[in-house]
């Protein structure tokens, strides 16, 4: 019995030191300094140092210190202290496995981390967030964050953390099945760590390189690197690396069916994990024990096989129980479910096996883990065959073969070998001899072909000469035409560049008239704005203003896209400024009435045939947070309000801002009583109208409502990210067909 080997790669946390001073190892001295510190930057620096010292040892105390630093930094407007406190808070949550909170503080810190003085913190944040996504099996996103961190660390000449970025990218590329890039990043990490004499990370990197060879079943080479890792880790007392490497060596012994040796090194790893309280290491190791006992069962007589399999299943269940309680790591759950499924197959309990394997397959498909999907189909084929359901057994076997063929890539293995060592001299000699023999054979064949070719050339020359004069004359004509065409193309390109530059300048103007981020953040703490123009400039726009402590919110969709739509949007903003600021109109229905009159008058719309029918669909809200009242009026565009997870939809009037043959005298004004925790949204139809999905159809309103309902428990920043990711995934390779605007506000 053989399961796919799961190899846990060592990944690195960022190391950040504040520029003001190096951290002290003496917590008592820092606590004493804190008592005498004034309410200024020095106290913030001490609090952040204390937090850094406590992290990993006493995370609750670390969180308390970093939150005090955050409050004081905001009070005296000390950006560097605030950025550092955000990072320490995030790192505390990382160690508490509260990953949503890590991402929340990452988003909060982004604006202040743009300053060059905060680049060190920004880089550390990118590395930390990359770790979060890697743990959650979102490897492509993790790599993106590692690359951002690497760019910042390189600009700061921070070699230690640059090496950490390379190391973590290596692990992520391995999980994506790209062994060539994985090994390339590990060697870059190793080179830097050896240069700066970081023996702790040298040991880790040796272990990771060994893991690549193990995955390729090059066990002797893998053991060579693992032994190097243990030797160096022992000198630095790096128990984590020692335990991980012992576990990986045990995996090799299992593959070679040296089960007694496997159990010995696993026990060494187990004792170390328990000693350092490494929950993740224990989850992985329990699965490894399960794999070993499952493989050992193959060697046992029938009467002992069941007891050995029960030991395997006991370890798989221990891993699942600890994982569900503490970690929620997807790949380890898949491994446990697959192990249980395979064990039940050998016990001939096929229905139970199918249940566990389907759980593993569903999770593997959700996270696009090709190797695990392949394994699941293989086991399902065996289980259905055991139930005499040969149709499903055959279907799953075909799927297994398809996945298996796509994953076996000889070229990838060859490039991996080339990246790690040079070819042996005798191999080069043999290759050269083979190449020379090929050349000799080709030369002999060429001699025969040349004789035939000479005969055909003599015949062809006569024919060719008849056409040569005609071709020459034709060439001269084309040459003149091409010169003229080239000049025309240059003129067109120049005009195109001038037009594009003008549109980009128009974009800067359009962006300048939109509400600033500072104003929005100050007046709407819990909100998001999703604004995605289809072209350089947008026909959708949003507008906000504050009158007597009441906030007016507008989301509008003008006729057309690009430049025509942008002209309408700028007219809309101009009219809104006049209606609200000059005319002192704040009631949403009256704002729409006046806006309609302004548009009709400006565009000379009288209803006659042939005249412009331009206008806009719009939603306007007046938010009074003191009285907890919300007024709303809409021209086609509705208002979605969610209360306790339930949708309350208020529809707009079915008439636009512009000329309309069935228009009413006035738009309807709706007044809504708000409750704490309510979330409401105004938007254009651009999001729901995007084409994509498996059939290239529209996203549509009903899925849009369901999506909003499903994310009500998330923060507004998380909602924005989910909406962005969902529509991008939906569109895939299909171009965006419409501008998009969504405003979300939580009370």
Image (tube, rainbow, N blue to C red):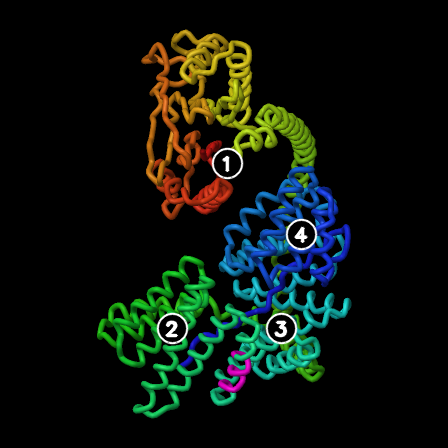
**Secondary structure mainly formed by the magenta segment:** helix
Q: Which residue occupies the foreground of this view, 208 or 420? A: 208
Q: Residue at x 77, y 54 (%)?
A: 21
Q: Residue under circle 3? A: 209
Q: Considering the numbered disc 1 on the image, is that residue within a helix, a strand or a loop? A: loop
Residue 663 x, y percent position in the rendering: 34, 13
Separation of disc 3 and disc 2 at Cα? 30 Å
Q: Secondary structure at mark 2?
A: helix
Q: CA separation, marks 1 and 3? A: 46 Å
- On the picture, is 559 further left or further right than 45? left
Which secondary structure, mark 4? Answer: helix
Pointer 4 residue: 123
Q: Residues within 10 Å of mark 4 (few under 14, many from 20)?
A: many
Residue holding disc 2: 317
Q: Residue 526 bears which disc, if any?
A: 1
Query: Callout 3: helix, strand or loop?
Result: helix
Residue 173 drawn in magenta: no
Please state if 541 lies on the left or on the right of 311 as rendered: right
Q: Position of residue 283 (x, y in %)?
A: 47, 71
Residue 467 rendering spot, x and y as whole percentages = 62, 46
Residue 269 is drawn in which quadrant? Answer: bottom right
| Closer to us: 385 or 92 | 92
Which residues lie in the magenta part? 262-270
Image position of 211 with respect to 165: above or below:
below
- Contact? badges 1 and 2 (CB < 8 Å): no
Does the rendering let one see residue 443? Answer: no
Q: Quadrant of residue 696?
A: top left
Q: Earlier in the sequence, mark 2 or mark 4?
A: 4
- Is residue 668 something one can see in this rendering? yes
Q: Nearer the viewer, mark 4 or mark 3?
A: 4
């Amino acid at each position: 019995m053989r399961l796919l080997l799961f190899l846990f790669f060592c990944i690195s946390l960022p190391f950040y030191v504040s520029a003001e001073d190096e951290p002290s190892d003496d917590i008592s001295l820092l606590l004493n300094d804190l008592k005498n510190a004034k309410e200024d930057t020095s106290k913030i620096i001490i609090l952040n140092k204390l937090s850094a010292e406590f992290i990993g040892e006493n995370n609750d105390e670390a969180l308390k210190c970093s939150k005090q630093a955050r409050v004081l930094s905001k009070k005296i407007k000390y950006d560097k202290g605030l950025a550092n406190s955000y990072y320490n808070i995030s790192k505390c949550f990382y160690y508490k496995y509260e990953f949503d909170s890590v991402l929340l503080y990452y988003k909060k810190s982004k604006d202040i981390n743009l300053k060059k003085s905060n680049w060190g913190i920004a880089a550390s944040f990118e590395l930390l967030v990359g770790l979060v996504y890697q743990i959650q099996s979102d490897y492509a996103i993790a790599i993106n964050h590692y690359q951002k961190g690497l760019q910042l660390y390189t600009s700061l000449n921070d070699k230690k953390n640059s090496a950490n970025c390379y190391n973590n990218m290596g692990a992520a590329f391995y999980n994506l099945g790209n062994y060539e890039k994985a090994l390339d990043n590990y060697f870059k990490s190793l080179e830097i760590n050896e240069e700066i004499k970081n023996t702790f990370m040298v040991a880790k990197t040796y272990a990771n390189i060994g893991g690549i060879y193990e995955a390729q079943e090059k066990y002797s080479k893998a053991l060579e690197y693992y032994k190097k890792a243990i030797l160096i880790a022992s000198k630095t007392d790096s128990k984590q690396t020692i335990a991980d490497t012992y576990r990986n060596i045990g995996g090799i012994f299992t593959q070679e069916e040296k089960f007694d040796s496997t159990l010995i090194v696993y026990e060494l790893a187990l004792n170390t994990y328990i000693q350092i309280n490494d929950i993740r290491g224990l989850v992985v190791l329990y699965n490894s024990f399960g794999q070993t006992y499952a493989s050992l069962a193959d060697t046992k007589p029938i009467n002992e096989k069941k007891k050995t399999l029960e030991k395997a299943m006991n370890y798989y269940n221990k891993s699942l129980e600890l994982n569900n309680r503490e970690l929620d790591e997807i790949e380890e759950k898949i491994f446990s479910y697959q192990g249980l499924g395979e064990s039940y197959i050998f016990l001939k309990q096929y229905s139970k096996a199918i249940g566990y394997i389907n759980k593993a397959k569903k999770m593997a498909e959700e996270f696009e883990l090709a190797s695990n999907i392949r394994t699941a189909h293989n086991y399902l084929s065996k289980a259905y065959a055991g139930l005499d359901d040969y149709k499903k057994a055959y279907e799953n076997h075909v799927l297994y073969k398809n996945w298996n063929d796509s994953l076996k890539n000889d070229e990838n293995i060859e490039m991996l070998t080339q990246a790690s060592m040079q070819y042996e001299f005798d191999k080069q000699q043999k290759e050269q001899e083979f190449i020379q023999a090929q050349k000799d054979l080709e030369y002999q064949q060429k001699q025969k072909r040349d004789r035939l070719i000479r005969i055909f050339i003599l015949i062809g020359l006569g024919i060719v000469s008849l056409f040569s004069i005609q071709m020459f004359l034709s060439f001269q004509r084309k040459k003149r035409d091409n010169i003229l065409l080239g000049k025309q193309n240059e003129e067109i390109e120049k005009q195109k560049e001038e037009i594009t530059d003008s549109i980009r300048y128009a974009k800067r103007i359009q962006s300048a008239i939109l509400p600033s981020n500072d104003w929005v953040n100050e007046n709407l703490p819990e909100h998001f704005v999703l604004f995605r123009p289809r072209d350089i400039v947008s026909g959708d726009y949003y507008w906000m203003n504050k009158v007597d402590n009441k906030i007016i919110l507008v989301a509008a969709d003008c006729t057309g896209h690009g430049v025509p739509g942008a002209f309408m949007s700028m007219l809309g903003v101009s009219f809104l400024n006049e209606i609200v600021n000059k005319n002192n109109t704040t009631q949403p229905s009256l704002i729409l009435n006046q806006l309609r009159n302004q548009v009709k008058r400006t565009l000379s719309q009288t209803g006659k045939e042939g005249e412009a029918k331009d206008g806009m669909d719009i939603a306007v809200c007046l938010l009074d947070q003191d009285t907890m009242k919300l007024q709303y009026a809409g021209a086609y565009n509705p208002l979605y309000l969610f209360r306790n997870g339930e949708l309350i939809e208020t529809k707009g009037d079915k008439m636009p801002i512009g000329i309309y043959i069935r228009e009413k005298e006035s738009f309807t004004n709706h007044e809504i009583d708000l409750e704490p925790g309510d979330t409401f949204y105004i938007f254009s139809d651009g999001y729901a109208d995007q084409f994509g999905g498996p059939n290239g159809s529209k996203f549509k309103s009903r899925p849009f409502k369901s999506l909003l309902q499903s994310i009500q428990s998330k923060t507004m920043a998380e909602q924005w990210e989910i909406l962005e990711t969902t529509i991008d995934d939906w569109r895939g390779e299909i171009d965006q067909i419409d501008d998009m605007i969504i405003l979300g506000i939580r009370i």
